[in-house]
Every structure is written in C-alpha cells, then in structure tokens.
Amino acid sequence: MSTSLATHTSEELIALEAEWGARNYRPLDLVIVRGDGAWVMDVEGRSYLDCLSAYSAVNQGHCHPRLLATLTEQAARVTLTSRAFRNEQLPLFCEELAQLCGMEMVLPMNTGAEAVETAIKAARRWGYTTKSIPADAAQIIVFDGNFHGRTTTIVGFSSDAAYREGFGPFAPGFVRVPFGDIEAVRAAINANTCAVLFEPIQCEAGVIIPPDGFLRDLAALCAEENVLLIADEIQTGLGRTGRRFACDHEDITPDMYVLGKALSGGFYPVSAVVSSREVLGVFGPGTHGSTYGGNPLGCAVARTALEVMNDEGLIERSADLGAWLLEELRTLQHPHIVAVRGRGLILAIELNVPARAYCEALMKRGLLCKETHDTVIRLAPPLVVRKEDLAWAVEQLRAVFSVS
C-alpha cells in the first residue's frame, strides 16, 4: 500500500476524538487510513493484519475492487429513491438473496439492529394474526449471553448489566433462558410464545458454540410447538463459519434469517430479514419501513458482495483456513490461556486475565484483534486472507504468549 496522505498524526487525531467524540467505544490507539484485502495502514504508514474484519462485516476484504466498482457506478446513477418509488436494484437483490437463503421474501433494512427489530415485529404480528395469541401478550424466547444490537428493545433482554444500566424502562415480552439448554427452552414455551431468537454461535459473548445437536433439537421443538425460529446470522452468516450460514453446520433452516454486516462487504450499511410469505406477508403498506432500506446503492453493493462470496470461494476458504488456524492456535501454551475454540474464521482465545494488554501487545507487532467480554481475544480475519498471513499471525501470537 502507498504511504499515508494524512495531514495529522495519530496522537493529534486520537486527542481530537477524545475531545469531540462521544466515548461509547474504547478502540485500540491506532488510526487507520487505508485498507487492502486483509491489511490496513495507519497514519504513520505502518501496516497491520486485520483480524477483526469490522466485526465480520469485511468478509470480502477491505476495498474489494469489484465492490468499489459497483459502488462508484451505482453512485453515479442514483443512490436513493426512498420506498415511495421503485428502483431497479431492489427486486434483483430480493430475488438473489431469497434464493440464496432458500426463502420466499426479503425485507431490506440498513443496520443489524434494525433487522433484528424488524424480525421481532414480524414475529409478534405473526403470533397475533396466525397463532391467535391475545393482543399484546406475545412472548419471544432469547438466550443468556445474547447480543443482537444496541436499541432499547434489544438491550432490554440482554443478560449483560453494562448494556442495560441507565437505559430503562424496557419493553416486555421477552423470556431469557440459558444458551444451549434445550430443556430450558421447552419449559419456557407456552401458548403465547411466538418465536425463539438465537445466534447459532454467540460471537460477542466470546465465540460460544452450543452443544452438538442443540440447533437441531431447537428447530424440532419450535416446529412441534408452532413457534418461529429466528436465526441472527448477522456476524456468523455468509461464509464466516465455513458454511453459507452457521445453521448449516446442523443442517437446519430457520423460519427467519436476520442478516447484515458482510451482506455489503463493509462498503455500505445493508441488512435484511429473509423468510416465508406467511411470515413477512404480515406487513402491509405503512406497517413498517425505512427511508434508506432497500435503496439502489445498497442493493447494488450487496448483490456484488454475494457474487464475490461465491465467485472467490470464500466459504470454502473460511472452512479450510479456519480449520488450519484452529489447530495451530491450540498448540499455544501459556498459563493464562484457558481455552481455544472456533468454527471457520471466527475463533477465540479465552484467558483467565483481562485480554486488553495482549491485544495491545499484538497491535505493536502488527496484528489487530480486539477483546470481547474482557477476557476473550476474538480473531476474525477477512475471508480473503492468505494462509501465509495467518502463519505470520500465529508467529506473533506465539511471541506474545511466550513464557519467559
């Protein structure tokens, strides 16, 4: 990559952000100005291997040339029409995404949280109109450790006190049970249960993988009880875990997919709920909407992002490279390492001490990753990453975790 064109130093930019920006994040102290594939560059021209991928939004790599070309071409034609008028990209996007998911209907939004809120609204209305649940009594089962977004509705059913504190009162209608416990789900279901909302792998909680068979049992239970199964695949979908969707690891198809992040390859906010006509057909004109949702720019970028995923074999790359990387990481020996786990190119190193210092040490060696839930290092490089880059990353991890 070429040298930086920035006119400020990292220290100056960090100070400006500290003075003028809200402090709702605690980023590592580097300032990125360029990205190319799996690598990024800071203001001073130092290169880093990105092993976070913007929380799995950049599966196709930074500044993918095909995505850039699509963005530029569409931006020169028309970017936003609102849903008051039709645009040529939306129907093509809906058809292609529905077929990818094996579903019948798509409702596009912008952010992951918006898509989750859309799924909640669809499930509740389905419960009232199809299952005849009494008005305002619908319940949705969620799981301990969940992370579905940051809206007040969503944080209201989080089990993390830090996400909830100071933001109530919260919306009722959610029942939380232990993740991976099928009997707890069974016990929580009643006549007013309209849906179960789950992540097939809880990424934000520390890459928590449920017990084998749990997803199959959950799908069977929901079908038996006439309860919608909603899979939040915002982080795990579109190749991240080595399959098209993480649900594919147990050969289940939910009633609704909630998608986002890599759906647009990091170029533009695009999310979607994908389901049957029975479920998404509960919405009529005026019952739900978004000015930007389904805009031609976002739809065009998302269509190319899906093409890149297929054309470049990113799902297969994730499976192969992820299996190799997991095996390598499991050879790390250090008294602070409790466990190493993962599926595809979403992996975690769990520690028995805070992980921040290790992330900072890795940053100094040119490897970018981020702690989650304080004691877990999450590794999720772009799916275009080269094996030699991952081998280099393992060397940096060995150096940082070397026992003196």
Image (cartoon, rainbow, N blue to C red):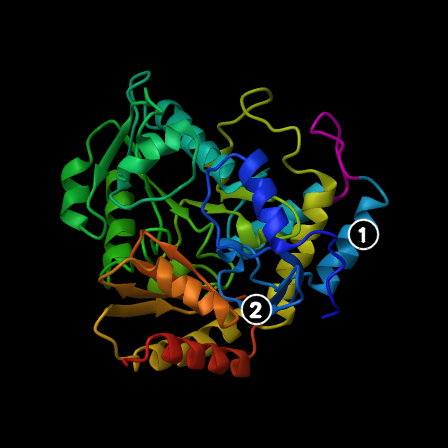
Left or right: 387 with respect to 220?
A: right
In the rendering, at what x and y percent does residue 5 appear? 76, 58
Answer above or below: position of 1 versus 264: below
The reply to whether the C-beta atoms of the residues labelled 1 and 2 are less than 8 Å apart is no
The span from disc 1 to disc 2 (Cα, nearest Å) is 27 Å
Q: Secondary structure at mark 2?
A: strand
Q: Quadrant of residue 36?
A: bottom right
Q: For label 1, count other residues whose C-alpha is less than 10 Å away and answer few (under 14), some (14-19) or many (20+).
A: few
Under mark 1, the amino acid is Thr
**Does the segment drawn in magenta span residue 31?**
no
Q: Quadrant of residue 336?
A: bottom left
In the rendering, at what x and y percent does residue 228 appear? 35, 39
Q: Residue at x 60, y 22 (%)?
A: 285
Q: For label 2, count other residues whose C-alpha is less than 10 Å away and answer few (under 14), some (14-19) or many (20+).
A: many
The secondary structure that dominates the magenta segment is loop
Q: State which tag comes first along the sequence, 1 or 2.
A: 2
Of 326 and 12, nearer the camera is 12
Q: Residue at x 47, y 56 (%)?
A: 237
In the rendering, at what x and y percent does residue 358 appear? 37, 65
Task: Say whether residue 153 is visible.
Answer: yes
Of 381 and 302, nearer the camera is 381
Give the residue pinned by disc 2.
Answer: 48
In the rendering, at what x and y percent does residue 137 appear? 28, 20
Left or right: 234 with respect to 65?
A: left
Q: Which residues are magenta?
A: 79-89
Give the residue pinned by disc 1.
Answer: 72
Under mark 2, the amino acid is Tyr
Q: Which label is found at residue 249?
A: none
